[in-house]
Image (cartoon, rainbow, N blue to C red):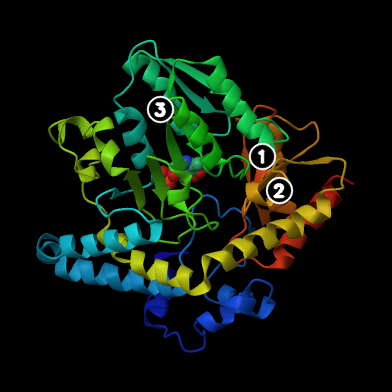
Amino acid sequence: MDRRQFLTTTAALATASMVGTPMISLAQQSRAADDENFWQIVRNQYDVTDEITNLEAGYWGIMSIPVTQAYIQNTHFVNQNSSYYARRHYRQDYDKIIDRLARKLGVGNDEIVLTRNATEALQSLINGYNKLEPGDTVIYADLDYGSMQSEMRYLKTYRGVNVVAIAIPEPASYENVIAAYEKALDDHPKCKMMLMTHVSNRTGLITPVKEVVKMAKSRGVDVILDAAHSWGQFDFDFQDLDVDFAGFNLHKWIGVPIGVGMLYIRKNRVLDIDPLRGEAAPDNDNVRTRVHTGTMNFASVLTIPDALDFGENIGIKNIEKRFRALRNQWVDKVIDNENIEILTPQDERMYAAITSFRIKGKTSNQENRDLVKLLTDKYGIFTVANGGISNGAGIRVSPALYNSREDADKLANALNDITG
Ligand SMILES: Cc1ncc(COP(=O)(O)O)c(C=O)c1O
């Protein structure tokens, strides 16, 4: 799209009213999950290219049209009012947004701070965790996010600890994942801290966080939770997980404009994370001193309430059911295909939108990248190849609310066609 087209499109978006795109009524929610008409209304709230069937929403979650409109308006507002707004009023707006996010997560407003993404939040947590002594052990898993794994490995240099990587079993089950973490803790009694990923970016696996955290805590081991993919993808009670440290993304499944993540530290644990590079005295327990984002995109932050409104209007239980339905729509059609391995188990506790697969025997990154290319070029379907899985690479499929059941069918048909 050239600049002229871009300006025309953004002008149209900025001026388009919501007339003709009916708002989703809360009354519809009870029948929403199975009602294709309802989901058509939701799909109409997204402006998506028809150049490709995009099943790669795991990268980041695009804004719905109302959120885009709010973002355009907020951008205009911030630009117009500049530092005069930012210096005088932004802080109050920010605090109100923090209050709302804290209520939604069921935590204190003094336990969270916004970051520019989950990476920034998790780097601060892993790097800042100050209870490690040389000779201690830290643990991460193959299904954790690559740059968080690097951050964990760096603790060897930075804190002098022994860094252990474990493999999540494949096929995974609720029990064998818990057992894998239990074995890791048994094998490494000097473990003090463990990274855990709530929803793996590699396979979409939802891990049994609550059970593992309980087990870890009983042995004096802290868990840092990578929740980059979970908030907004499915319904869970964060309090119930009993996690003390977590990093979130708002620009994935919550649908906030790009550039917003969040860090959580339980109030009585803030001192266990160092203030960022001398940001404050070590005894300062203000969570906001645990990151320093520098200037953030004010308009993105100001648009958070609009994205929350949009999601809450549909309802997280409905969203979760819809994601499972879209996932099952393609998985059910290929699960009996002997040449396809589904890398995410058929256990509703362990998946929502995202699921990965590989064609039997095709375990290299290159083979999977080639298949992504084939799916794109020949079948018009966009996905992504993911390496780093112990048993070999695979392809991740992440549908979004703008996808239809037909999109999922299209993928299943392509896979059955390719594997003959
Ligand atoms: C599990 C996981 N953790 C962390 C991140 C980092 O998110 P961001 O790039 O928005 O910082 C991602 C991004 O895909 C992820 O999938």
> Mark 1 is on which residue type?
Tyr
Q: Which residue is drawn at 20% across and 30% down?
A: 277
* SS label for mark 1: helix
Q: In this view, does 299 lie above or below 371?
A: below
Specify whether 59 is left or right of 265.
right
Q: Which residue is drawn at 21% across and 50% down?
A: 295
Q: Give neighbour class at mark 2: few <14, some 14-19, many 20+ (Cα, 10 Å).
A: few
Q: Looking at the image, tell me whether mark 1 or mark 2 is earlier in sequence order.
A: 1
* SS label for mark 2: loop
Specify whether 4 is left or right of 139.
left
Q: Name the residue under label 1.
A: 174
Q: Give neighbour class at mark 1: few <14, some 14-19, many 20+ (Cα, 10 Å).
A: some
Tell me: is circle 2 under 8 Å from ligand 1. no
> Mark 3 is on which residue type?
Glu
Examine the rendering and report whether any part of residue 48 can be seen. yes
Does the residue at mark 1 contact the one at mark 2 (Cβ under 8 Å)? Answer: yes
Q: Looking at the image, tell me whether mark 1 or mark 3 is earlier in sequence order.
A: 3
Q: In this view, does 269 lie above or below 252?
A: above
Q: Where is residue 259 in the image (x, y as percent from the top left)?
A: 35, 53
Q: Name the residue under label 3.
A: 151
Q: Position of residue 383 (x, y in %)?
A: 64, 49
* SS label for mark 3: helix
Examine the rendering and report whether any part of residue 383 can be seen. no
Q: Where is residue 183 in the image (x, y as percent from the top left)?
A: 60, 22
Specify whether 211 is left or right of 116.
right
Q: Is residue 344 above or below residue 412?
A: above
Q: Mark 2 points at which residue?
A: 347
Task: Tell me the number on the disc at residue 362.
Answer: none
Does the residue at mark 1 contact the one at mark 3 (Cβ under 8 Å)? Answer: no
